[in-house]
Image (tube, rainbow, N blue to C red):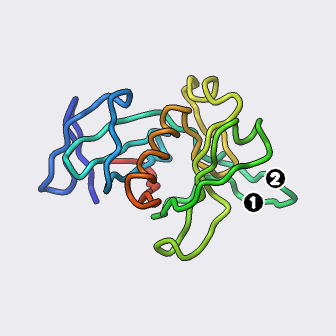
């Protein structure tokens, strides 16, 4: 899908116009979806009611890393996901004190190692201009994580998430 934007309006394809709502005023409703631009490290929520909002994210590092006894390329994959489960992780530095929302591939059939979560130093990370900070997961503020939780609750425990490299 091609995205075109102006100050307060985004057009998806040629048909639907979205109006901007500040993230602080976002109200989760069933059918909301999340898009993450891994090039510009920005996130978006889109509502079926025609609203959208933006927020900063941190995504995977553009390098090979050693993490959890694995060596892999840490850039966040650009694909379609479904967030289905809320989990608690035992590392309060890497995952913050909040929940971890697991991302699944294949329309929710294949569990991945990726997720949406905060970090102990998320505010510092999100304040930077370069936000390639994670080992592949999507890192968000506590407020955005609460919206993810609200959407999962509103939509029978699932959230469609798309990661793309650049939004046109």
In the image, 98 versus 67, the foreground residue is 98
In the image, 84 versus 104, the foreground residue is 84
The N terminus lies in quadrant: bottom left
Residue at image coords 54%, 76%: 109
Which percent across, then down, holds residue 2?
Answer: 27, 55
Residue at image coords 24%, 33%: 20
Residue at image coords 27%, 48%: 47
Instruction: Report the side of 67 relative to 56 (left or right).
Output: right
Are there few (<14), some (14-19), or many (20+) residues within 10 Å of tag 2? few
Nearer to us: label 1 or label 2: 2
**Image vertical order of residue 122 relative to residue 90, above or below:** above
Which percent across, then down, holds residue 96?
Answer: 69, 36
Which percent across, then down, holds residue 79?
Answer: 48, 63
Q: Counting residues from the N terminus, which is met first, the one under dot 1 or under dot 2?
A: 2
Q: Residue furthest right?
A: 69
Is there CB contact under 8 Å for labels 1 and 2?
Answer: yes
The numbered disc on residue 67 is: 2
Q: Which residue is mark 1?
A: 72
Which percent across, then down, holds residue 129?
Answer: 54, 26
Instruction: Report the side of 154 relative to 85 (left or right).
Output: left
């Amino acid at each position: 899908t091609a995205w075109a934007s102006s100050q307060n309006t985004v057009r998806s394809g040629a048909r639907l116009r979205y109006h901007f709502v500040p993230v602080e005023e976002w109200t989760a409703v069933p059918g909301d979806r999340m898009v993450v631009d891994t090039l510009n490290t920005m996130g978006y929520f889109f509502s079926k009611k025609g609203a959208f909002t933006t927020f900063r994210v941190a995504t995977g590092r553009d390098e090979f890393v050693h993490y959890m006894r694995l060596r892999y390329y840490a850039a966040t994959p650009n694909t379609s996901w479904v967030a289905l489960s809320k989990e608690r992780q035992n590392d309060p530095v890497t995952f913050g004190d909040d929940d971890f929302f697991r991302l699944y591939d294949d329309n929710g059939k294949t569990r991945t190692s990726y997720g949406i979560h905060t970090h102990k130093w998320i505010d510092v990370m999100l304040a930077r201009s370069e936000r390639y900070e994670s080992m592949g997961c999507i890192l968000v503020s506590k407020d955005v994580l609460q919206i993810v939780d609200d959407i999962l609750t509103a939509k029978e425990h699932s959230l469609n998430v798309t990661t793309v490299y650049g939004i046109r």
